[in-house]
Image (spheres, grey):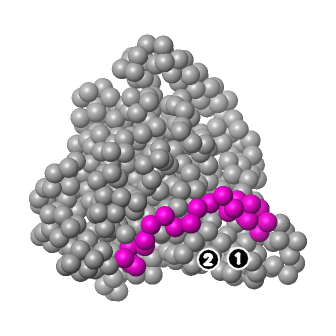
Amino acid sequence: MYKHTNDALDYVTRSGVKKPTIIYSLTVAAFISIISSSCTLLTSESAGGTRATKTLPNLVIILADDLGYADVGFNGSKEILTPEIDRIAKNGVRFTDAYVTYPVCGPSRAALLTGRYQDRFGFTTNPTLDPTNATAGLPVEEQMISEALRQANYKSAIVGKWHMGTHPVFHPLQRGFDYFFGFLGGFHQYFPDRLVLDELSEVQRMGQWGRTKIMENHERIVIDDYLTDELSDAAVRFMQKQVVDDQHFLLYLSYNAPHTPMQATDKYLSRFPNIEDPTRRTYAAMVSAMDDGIGRVMKYLQSSEIEENTIVVFLSDNGGARTNASQNIPLRGYKGDLLEGGIRVPFVMQWKGTIPSGIDYTEPVSSMDIMGTIVSLAGVKTKHELDGVNLIPYITGDEPGSPHEILFWRNWKNKDMAVRRGQNKIISSTPEENHEFFILTDDISEKKNVVAEHQKEAEQLYELWEKWNAPMKGRAFPDFLDDRWWEKNGK
Ligand code: CA
């Protein structure tokens, strides 16, 4: 069950990662001790106590959009090479069983950015992009990762796709971020000459949402390059400023690649002359552009000598989609499904000098754990109890067992549900009946429904799901495909 990619380390346990060496363990213990003492200093000195917060790690979250589980080198792709993303895995940990909380963009991101199941606050669908709707976004009562980290004097940037609401109350600069370079909606055109609208209020038909000019903070700006390249450049610029200021930071680099529309430049298309299917070829080029950009981000961390004080995570917001020619093999299903192909995502983390390198961690983890990890390390108290946990002690082996005994999903729109406990999973599109039961160790592709042999456990898992689901909220706002808001405005 355990694979590892670093011959220097020896892992033999079945569950959780065995401590690689006692030296790692001591390093982490020493680090956490430093963090604890620095947080005490932070409290006792002042909110601006830079000396006290210098040891806090930076966090770089790199999010791909609709990237297939199989379409990265570290998950075995031979067709689409991703050397830069693979380096993160080589330098750190590959999570083989990493999940997002929902199989499409908006709700998945709402959980990543709050550390909580999005169902707790009704973010159960992609919100309408109506810029006059002050309910269609991440509720202001919720605390985002950026807002939590302000308590520890982090500077935060969101570069790329926001999708947490288009009304001014949901703007990134209202939500704890200090810098925004990107767009507010859920997808975007990549070629600069297509970005012609000044505001979403100018939209006159479905799909024009992706044609707004890029925003830098509150300003609309004109860009010159392919959008993915522009986002990578903006990410590096933000980090450069933080390094000059000797400032610890959160960078949320939220690429829209390789989400539709399928658009790539010749520079990247020329790398894949052997892919015949034009959609797949363009997809590969879009992934390759993102990989180049991630390479620039990683090289900057190295050259500015902040690599060892920076946690980097890379993941996709949901599984590969049917529309962009992505591949989730050997997982079954796509974006939109609660099958593994919709919710199990490529996910790697590096933190040089603190967590082991070149290993696989095979217990289930969640995108919610990113916030769980950083708020724990930064010693900040969150407004709400989180569903995400600090992964670091599990990775190092200081904490035995699994970060999540059980994980739950519901697709409120389709009435689908799923539960994973250990290696066992139930899934149903009619929650109260017809559960399918899969044992993922033997059947990662979810092809052998063994519910007949596991009826009792299936019922038990469903009961647990019902308990989890009881306090969850219904849809808080209209779906973006259901709401023709520009027509209501007389357009
Ligand atoms: Ca997505």
In the picture, which quadrant includes the N terminus?
Answer: bottom right
The residue at the point 44 percent across, 64 percent down is 106
> In the displayed structure, does residue 271 sit left or right of residue 220?
right
Local crowd size for mark 1, using a 10 Å CA cut-off: few (<14), some (14–19), many (≥20): some
In the picture, which quadrant includes the C terminus?
Answer: bottom left
Q: Which mark is residue 431?
A: 1
Could you tell me how far apart the alpha carbons at marks 1 and 2 are, in whole angstroms? 7 Å
Give the total number of marks visible in the rendering: 2
Nearer-the-camera pick, 40 or 81: 40
Dominant SS in magenta:
loop
Query: Pointers 1 and 2 in contact (CB under 8 A)?
Result: yes
Question: Dot 2 corresponds to which residue?
Answer: 415
Q: In the figure, residue 84 lies in which quadrant?
A: bottom left
Kind of residue at disc 2: Lys
Q: Is residue 464 magenta?
A: yes
Nearer-the-camera pick, 442 or 409: 409
- Segment tinted magenta in the rendering: 462-483
